[in-house]
Image: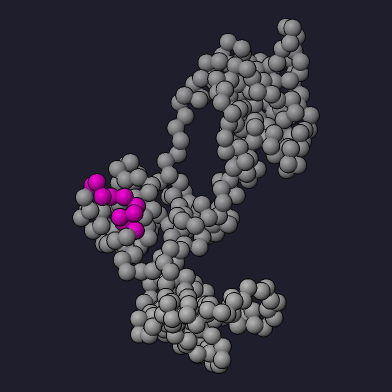
């Protein structure tokens, strides 16, 4: 792209390639694509990093049969929108010039229709291989992403598919497997397991949920499992536990794989909870509840004391929170922590 003023001589005719300033371009009413374009931000990033690979096709703008000095884009409306976005964001100047092919009015509508109807979107499998080739050339996902106008996470997700068995990847490239299926199989890098799961699973069961369940087996889901929430991902990883990350889900989702480490952490937490509970319950005792009929007799002549709001000190408030946590988590880890069946119903009171 140049920053000089666009100039034309009288010798320039239709089908001539010239450079025209962005501020002299406008979308043509002859462009057959009427729906608002999408993905312009990504395309703008791509144009900024790679330049305008394909020239625009334009006609000379005329009003009242007089040339205005501007040009209408009949093929390349999305590219024009991307250029205008780059100008609006200050990443390009309105005076920057791009290559344009000037055609006659009679050719304009036919060319616009031919470009939009003959276009075929790139298959994701081709995109995967393109990302892999760039990676093998020494580029990191953070460097690849701006070249294609996508996020680094998108690049990492596509690169994850390169770990799928070549035989299965060929099925995906031939549209005999969908994206959800291959992304689920990419949870494991074991090609034999991938192929076995695909070949041994009935066709009606070949879905991402089935494949994820078969691959993860007894592993613990970090997002939905109460045990995983109790153990904590940070504590698990700090102890050397491995997590099978699912790049095709949210960043905080995955599967804890090491049951031994989970067991060690659980035992440590149980011991901590028991110590905390015993310390908090020091000075308290269980007061068995009386039979309701006996209690009502004892209460005769003794008016009920109305509840009163009291100010709890920060220290006592913290003790109450710890006690509640010990009771709740103690019951979750081991029901014997609070044995409701080994004694009559009771109230915890202070001596």
* Residue drawn at the location 61% of the way across and 32% of the way down: 79
In the displayed orientation, state which residue is furthest to the front.
Answer: 301
In the displayed orientation, state which residue is furthest to the top.
Answer: 65
* Residue drawn at the location 66% of the way across and 15% of the way down: 13
| On screen, residue 102 above or below 141 | above
- Magenta span: predominant SS is helix
Q: Is residue 335 left or right of residue 31?
A: left
* Residue drawn at the location 68% of the way across and 32% of the way down: 98
Residue 195 image-quadrant placement? bottom left
Q: Is residue 7 visible?
A: yes
| On screen, residue 262 above or below 96 | below
Residue 85 spot, x, y in % from top left: 69, 37
Q: Is residue 205 magenta?
A: yes
Of residues 225 and 27, which is closer to you in this image?
225
Q: Is residue 134 visible?
A: no
Residue 296 spot, x, y in % from top left: 48, 77
Segment tinted magenta in the rendering: 203-212
Q: Is residue 277 magenta?
A: no
Residue 131 spot, x, y in % from top left: 48, 51
| On screen, residue 42 above or below 237 | above
Q: How many marks?
A: 0
Of residues 3 and 123, which is closer to you in this image?
123
Of residues 114 and 17, which is closer to you in this image?
114
* Residue drawn at the location 38% of the way across and 69% of the way down: 220
Which part of the image, by quadrant, shows the C terminus?
bottom right
Residue 100 spot, x, y in % from top left: 64, 26
Q: Is residue 217 left or right of residue 243?
A: left
| Colour scheme employed for the rendering of this structure | one colour
Which part of the image, by quadrant, shows the N terminus?
top right
Q: Is residue 317 left or right of residue 33?
A: right
């Amino acid at each position: 792209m140049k920053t000089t003023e666009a100039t034309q001589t009288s010798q320039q005719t239709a089908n001539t390639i010239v450079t025209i300033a962005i501020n002299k371009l406008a979308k043509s009413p002859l462009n057959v694509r009427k729906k608002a374009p999408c993905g312009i931000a990504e395309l703008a990033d791509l144009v900024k990093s790679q330049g305008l690979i394909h020239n625009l096709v334009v006609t000379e703008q005329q009003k009242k049969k007089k040339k205005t000095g501007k040009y209408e884009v009949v093929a390349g409306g999305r590219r024009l929108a991307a250029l205008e976005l780059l100008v609006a964001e200050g990443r390009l100047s309105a005076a920057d010039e791009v290559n344009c092919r000037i055609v006659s009015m009679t050719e304009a509508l036919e060319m616009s229709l031919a470009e939009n109807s003959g276009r075929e979107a790139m298959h994701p499998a081709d995109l995967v291989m393109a990302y892999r080739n760039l990676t093998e050339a020494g580029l990191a996902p953070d460097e690849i992403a701006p070249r294609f106008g996508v996020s680094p996470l998108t690049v990492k997700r596509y690169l994850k598919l390169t770990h799928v068995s070549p035989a299965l990847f060929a099925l995906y490239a031939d549209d005999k497997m969908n994206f959800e299926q291959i992304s689920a199989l990419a949870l494991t890098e074991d090609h034999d397991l991938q192929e076995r799961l695909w070949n041994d699973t009935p066709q009606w069961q070949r879905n991402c949920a089935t494949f994820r369940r078969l691959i993860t087996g007894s592993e613990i889901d970090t997002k939905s499992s109460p045990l995983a929430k109790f153990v904590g991902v940070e504590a698990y990883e700090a102890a050397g536990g491995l997590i099978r990350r699912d790049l095709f889900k949210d960043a905080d989702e995955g599967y804890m794989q090491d049951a031994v480490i989970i067991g060690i952490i659980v035992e440590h937490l149980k011991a901590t909870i028991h110590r905390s509970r015993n310390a908090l319950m020091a000075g308290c005792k269980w007061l068995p509840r009386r039979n309701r009929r006996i209690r009502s007799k004892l209460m005769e002549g003794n008016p009920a004391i109305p509840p009163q709001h009291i100010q709890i000190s920060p220290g006592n408030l913290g003790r109450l929170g710890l006690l509640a946590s010990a009771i709740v988590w103690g019951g979750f880890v081991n029901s014997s922590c609070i044995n409701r069946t080994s004694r009559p119903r009771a109230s915890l009171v202070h001596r």
